[in-house]
C-alpha cells in the first residue's frame, strides 16, 4: 500500500483512454473521429465518473479529434465541467512525456483528468502505480481498452512529486454505452 508521508493532500489522477475511434480512408491519424461505439461510450464514461464522485478540477486532453470529442461527450454529462487544456504533447506521448505535462499542473488541482492514447496511458498507469486495489493492476496489464478509466491516488504537495511507484491504483472501469 502507498503510505501517507505527511506530504500534502490526497490527490487523484483519472486516466481516460479516448473512446473508440473510426478508421476512415484518407484521414490522418490525428484527425480520426469517434466511431458510433465511441459516441455511445464517452457519455457513459462521464456518467461513471460522476457516479464515482470522481469529477476533476482540471482536464488535460490530447489535441487529436477523437480525444477532444471524447472530452466533449464526457463533460456534457456534468452540470459544470472543469476547465480543459488541450495539449499537443499528449498525442502519441510516451509515459515520460505524459508525466512531463502532468508535472506542470498547478498545486491547487487535487483531481486531474488526463485524456489521451495507448500505449502511453497504459504504460503510465503501470509505472505510477506502486500498488493496486483488488485486481486493478492485472486488469491494466491485460488490457486498457478504449474508454477505460484508471484512478490513481497519492499524497503530495505538488504534481511534480508524482513519480513512478508513488500512487495507488484504486479503480479501473470500462464504461459502455447502450446500443439503441
Image (cartoon, rainbow, N blue to C red):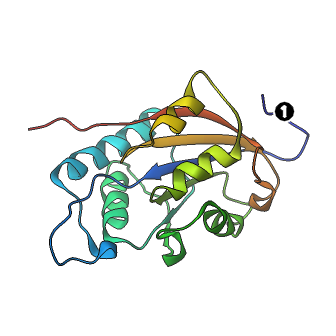
Q: Quadrant of the C terminus?
A: top left
In the rendered image, residue 14, in percent from the top left (x then y), is placed at 55, 47
Q: Which residue is painted at 85% across and 35% down in the image?
A: 4
Residue farthest to the top, as pictured: 134
Q: Quadrant of the N terminus?
A: top right
The answer to whether residue 158 is visible is yes
Q: In the rendered view, tell whether residue 89 sits above or below residue 180.
A: below
In the rendered image, residue 75, in percent from the top left (x then y), is placed at 37, 55
Q: In the rendered view, tell whether residue 124 sits above or below residue 176.
A: below
**Residue highlighted by disc 1:** 3
Q: Is residue 27 left or right of residue 117?
A: left
Q: Which residue is painted at 28% across and 75% down in the image?
A: 31
Q: Which residue is painted at 38% across and 55% down in the image?
A: 18
Residue 135 lies in what quarter of the image? top right
In the rendered image, residue 96, in percent from the top left (x then y), is placed at 67, 64
Q: Which residue is painted at 43% across and 57% down in the image?
A: 81
Between 78 and 168, the residue placed more toward the observer is 168
In the rendered image, residue 58, in percent from the top left (x then y), is placed at 55, 60
Q: Is residue 100 left or right of residue 121?
A: right
Local crowd at mark 1 within 10 Å, few (<14), some, or many (≥20)?
A: few
Q: Is residue 140 left or right of residue 11?
A: left
The answer to whether residue 53 is visible is no
Between 9 and 118, the residue placed more toward the observer is 118
Residue at disc 1, secondary structure: loop
Amino acid at each position: 500500500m502507498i503510505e501517507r508521508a505527511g506530504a500534502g493532500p490526497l490527490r487523484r489522477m483519472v486516466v481516460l483512454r479516448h473512446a473508440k475511434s473510426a478508421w476512415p480512408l484518407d484521414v490522418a491519424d490525428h484527425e480520426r473521429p469517434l466511431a458510433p461505439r465511441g459516441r455511445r461510450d464517452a457519455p457513459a464514461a462521464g456518467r461513471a465518473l460522476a457516479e464515482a464522485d470522481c469529477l476533476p478540477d482540471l482536464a488535460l486532453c490530447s489535441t487529436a479529434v477523437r480525444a477532444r470529442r471524447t472530452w466533449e461527450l464526457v463533460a456534457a454529462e456534468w452540470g459544470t465541467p472543469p476547465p480543459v487544456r488541450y495539449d499537443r504533447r499528449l498525442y502519441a506521448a510516451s509515459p515520460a512525456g505524459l508525466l512531463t505535462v502532468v508535472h506542470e499542473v498547478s498545486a491547487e488541482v487535487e483531481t486531474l483528468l488526463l485524456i489521451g492514447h495507448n500505449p502511453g496511458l497504459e504504460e503510465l498507469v503501470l509505472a505510477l502505480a506502486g500498488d493496486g486495489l483488488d485486481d486493478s493492476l492485472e486488469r491494466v496489464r491485460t488490457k486498457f481498452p478504449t474508454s477505460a478509466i484508471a484512478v490513481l491516488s497519492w499524497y503530495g504537495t505538488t504534481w511534480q512529486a508524482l513519480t513512478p511507484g508513488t500512487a495507488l491504483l484504486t479503480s479501473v472501469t470500462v464504461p459502455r454505452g447502450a446500443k439503441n
